[in-house]
Every structure is written in C-alpha cells, then in structure tokens.
Amino acid sequence: MATWHNREELEQLVITLSKQGVSRRAIARTAGVSRNTVKALLDAHETARESACEPGIASPPARTPRASKLDTFKPRITEVMARFNEITSQRVFEILRAEGFPGGYTAVKEYIRAVRPPPKPTPSLVTPGYLPGEMAESDWSPYEMQFTTGRKAIVQALSYVLVTSKRKFFELYESNDLHALMDGHALAFARFDACAQQCKYDSQKPVVLRWEGNQPIYNPRFLAFSSYYEFRPLAVRRGHPNDKPRTERSFWEVERSFLNGREFRDLDDMRAQLKLWLDTIVDHRRLEKRTALERFAEEREHLVPLPRHPYDTARVIYRLCSIDGFVAWAGNRYAIPYDHVTDILPVRITQRELFVYAADLRCIARHELAPRGAGLKLDPAQFHRPPQRKSAIDLDQLRLAFESMGERSTEFFRLMSQAAPRVWGAQGRQILLLRERYATLDLDLALGHAAQFGALGCAAVERILASRAAPRTLDEYVAEETARRIEITLGHARTEPRDLTEYDRLPPLSSGVSAKENACPSETDTADPNPTRTSSASASSDTSNSSDST
C-alpha cells in the first residue's frame, strides 16, 4: 500500500495512477481510501483544469442574501406545514395571500421545496414467491403499427412468462379474442414442451365472463382448454398490475428491444422477426449470471407435460353459400365447389387457414386466410367456374333443395318450374337464400301460402315471410337444430314444481302442544307410531306421484 502524509501527496498519487490507466477501485485499494474519495479528487482535478479562472486567483465570494417578502411569513408557513403534512404549495400560497402576503407563488413554492424533506422512496410491492413450475403469467398489449407497405394495423401482442425461470414467449395477432388466446398458449406450450401448473390472467372476457362478488365466472370454452392441458387459470382484478408484474414488465422489453429500431413489411414478416428475436436475444439474456435457457433447464422437470395432440383452437361457424359459390368471412369471400350453392355449411377457421365442410362433414374447400377486411375474392383453380351462359346452379339441384324443405315447397317448385327455366331458375335461387334469415319451417309455410294464390316470385314470398315470420340469425338456426336433435335423443323430461298451498293446509304447531295432539283426528288415528318413518314414506310417495304425473 502506498504511503502519503498530506492531501497534496494523496492528490498527486491518485492523479498519477489514473493517468497510467489504473481503475478507481485499484487506486482506492492502493491509497487506502474509499472510491468516493478517489472520484472526488479526480472530479476536482478535471474541474480545475477546465476552469476559466487562473489557478492562483480565488473564486469570488458569495453574495449576501437579500431580504425577501417571504421572510415575515416563514413562521406561518412552518406552522401550516406542521399542522397539515400533505398540504400543497398552492394551498399555502392561498392562505398567505389571504393573510396579506404581497409576493408571488414561485417564491412560496421554492421555499417549501427547500424546507420540506423529500419524500421517501416507495419500495416495490412484495410479490408472492412460487415453486418451480407452479405459476405463469399471461396478458395482452396492443400496438399501432405502420408497415413498410403503407398499411396501418393494430397488432395485439400476447405474452406468456414462466415466473420462476423468467423464460418468455410472445406471439402477434390481429385480435385478442378467445381463439387467438388459446392459439397463443398452444404455441407457447409447444415452444416450452410443457406448461406451468397455474397461470394468472386479468379479467379479460376470453377468460372471465363476469365476477360474482369476489368469485370469477370463467369462460367454459377456456376452462375446457385449460383442463385439456391440465393447468388452472387464476383470475386477478383489473387495475392491479403488481398481481402479475412479470408479464407487465415483459411488454417493456418488447417495446425497447423488439419494436425499437425495426421495420416490418406485414404481420407475417413481424412474426418471423419476433421468432428470431426470441431465439437469439430473449432466451440468451442473463439474469443472476445465468441465461433464461439455463434457468429453464432447472424448472423443466417441474412443469406439466403436454398431451400427445395439441388442442384444436379453431373457430367453427355456419355460413350460407352464395349463388355464385362463395362463403364470406372477415371481409373476404372464399370459393367452394359448385355443387354446394345455397347450402348452409360448417366452416372451420384457424389463425392461418379456412376449411369448408359439406353436410356430411367432408372437407370440400381449404383456403389460406386472407387479411381481415381486405375485400378479396379467393377463387382457386381447382374450383372450376362454369361458363357464363350456363345456369349458376343446376336445375335438378334446385328441385332437390325445394323437396328437402317439405311438401308445400315441393308443390311450389312444381308450379314454378312450369315456366321457362331461365325465368324461374333465378327466382328459385333467391328463394333458397331466404333460409339465411328465416327458419325452414316458416319458409315452407310461406311457399305453401304463395302457391295457393299463384304468387310464384321471390318478392311475393319475401313479403309473406315479413308479415308472418320473425327473422333470425344463423346462430339461432344452429341452436335450434341442436336442440331438436337433443329432444329426439332424450325426449321431454320436465319436473313440475309442487303446489305450495299443500303446506298452508297443514295444522300449525302451538307451544306446549305436541304434533300428535294438534293433528286432525283422522290423521292421528292412522298415524304410524314412528313419525320419522312416516315423514320419509310420505315424502317418497309425494316424489313418486310427482314423477308419475310428469
């Protein structure tokens, strides 16, 4: 250790070692002083070298403070601040002005800022600890993106973070609905080859339908998804970000490290760059001298293993095929084989593809999903369009469609088909499209009524439906069809409520009188000596009678 006897020798030693490239830590050990002392000496040396004054000239003395208008009011400020700890400078200024203070607000604010102690730093809230593999956190964050093609879009980023190892997963979607949430989780599970035992969410509708007091009512579809992967969702209230701080902090990482300084052509290009960022940056960031992959290796054995097949997160809807052979979804039209015109068909939609099935659930069309609202008309080559002069739908197919709706529709078609095909073909197609808004039974009744009066046009049938039937949606059509099939399978089974007036006819129990003494004579004569057994038998008899009547 170097020796020094006065401050000048210490300064000379510190400056010499610093010019030789020795670190401040090493200088402090050599000189036997603290690093703060070394820093102060070096800063003072640099300031003296950069100063405009000569080294031998003393700095000018500080000016004597002038009298202030606030001097006579300072005791009053101290009194007010002692009485009201959280009082603001504006409120103190108002009090002083009411008492004759001639100065301005700035002087009051600066004085209070100087005499009031600074607020104590608020420590971060303590978050609960979890065992390895026990907990994960997930949330959404929207970002308004400007792609290089000029298109603007709101991109929803999904985050899934393992609490113990801090390993993260992100995915991007056009919406944050239930199907996107399940698809993102399935991709996260596939990347980790496992999932946590529990996962925290806020009160987003895909997870929590509503709250009953402090009890969350979970979305049944998401519960089925979580049951398949054997993890338990844990809902937290909105406005409590510290309940899931790791996923909240993860979006700061997305904004600073991923979105910052990058350009994207479209959403697919953004997803590709996101995957590369996860593989090369996020998984290799060090925390506590270990990367996320190294920490994850220790947590891996505590996670829940995945099933053999991933969960089907696709959306299933019903769509009516238009006259020109297309089904519509999200602002685009997708072609299907020509034989299914005017049919109501099930459509399965994933995040990237669209599948159309026939009534017997054969897959008849498969399309790559177009951007939402693009207004595209997707017509692949395998679905050959007929020549323009050919009828847009085969006439025999029209006849079969009318016959499948009922006897009245069959008779209506017989009368309508007596005219030239080019006249009644278009009318028949328009009538079949009315099934999208009206029930098949209502349409069959309307066609029977129209046939009685010879009104064989689509406009007349539509007027009859408007006056006699209520429009409904395709969702209601599917629900009615499902209810009909359940009714055929299970039949009617309803339990009627009992008439509560039976209890009004029972004799009341008065104090000091037993139930046997207060009962009617006819009842006491025939009563069983064991009242408990009698009550049970009576209850059983009432239940059996109710079931028989039902």
Image: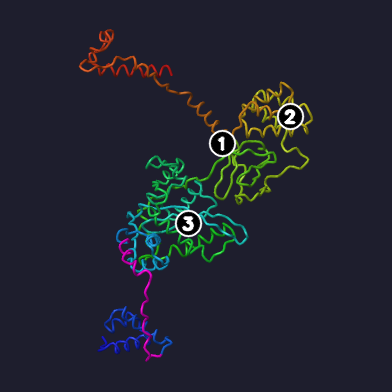
Give percent across and percent down for residue 51: 42, 86
Q: Work out whether residue 52 or residue 1 is closer to the camera in this orientation and state it.
A: 52
Of marks 3 and 2, the one in the foreground: 2
Pointer 1 local density, CA inside 10 Å: few below 14, some 14–19, many at least 20: few
Whether the residues at callouts 3 and 2 have beta carbons within 8 Å, the answer is no
Pointer 3 local density, CA inside 10 Å: few below 14, some 14–19, many at least 20: many
The quarter of the picture where residue 10 lies is bottom left
Residue type (three-letter) at the residue carrying disc 3:
Phe
Q: Left or right: 548 with respect to 401?
A: left
The quarter of the picture where residue 337 lies is top right
Residue type (three-letter) at the residue carrying disc 2:
Gly
- For image coordinates 58% across by 55% down, the residue present is 153
- For image coordinates 40% across by 57% down, the residue present is 246
- For image coordinates 66% across by 33% down, the residue present is 434
Q: Which residue is mark 3?
A: 170
Q: Is residue 241 above or below residue 413?
A: below
Q: Which residue is mark 2?
A: 457
- Cα distance, mark 1 to mark 2? 28 Å
Q: Quadrant of the C terminus?
A: top left
Residue type (three-letter) at the residue carrying disc 1:
Asp
Q: Which residue is mark 1?
A: 475
Q: Left or right: 208 with respect to 302?
A: right
Q: Is residue 236 above or below residue 53?
A: above
Give percent across and percent down for residue 47: 39, 84
Magenta residues, as a range?
Answer: 54-80
Callout 1 secondary element: helix
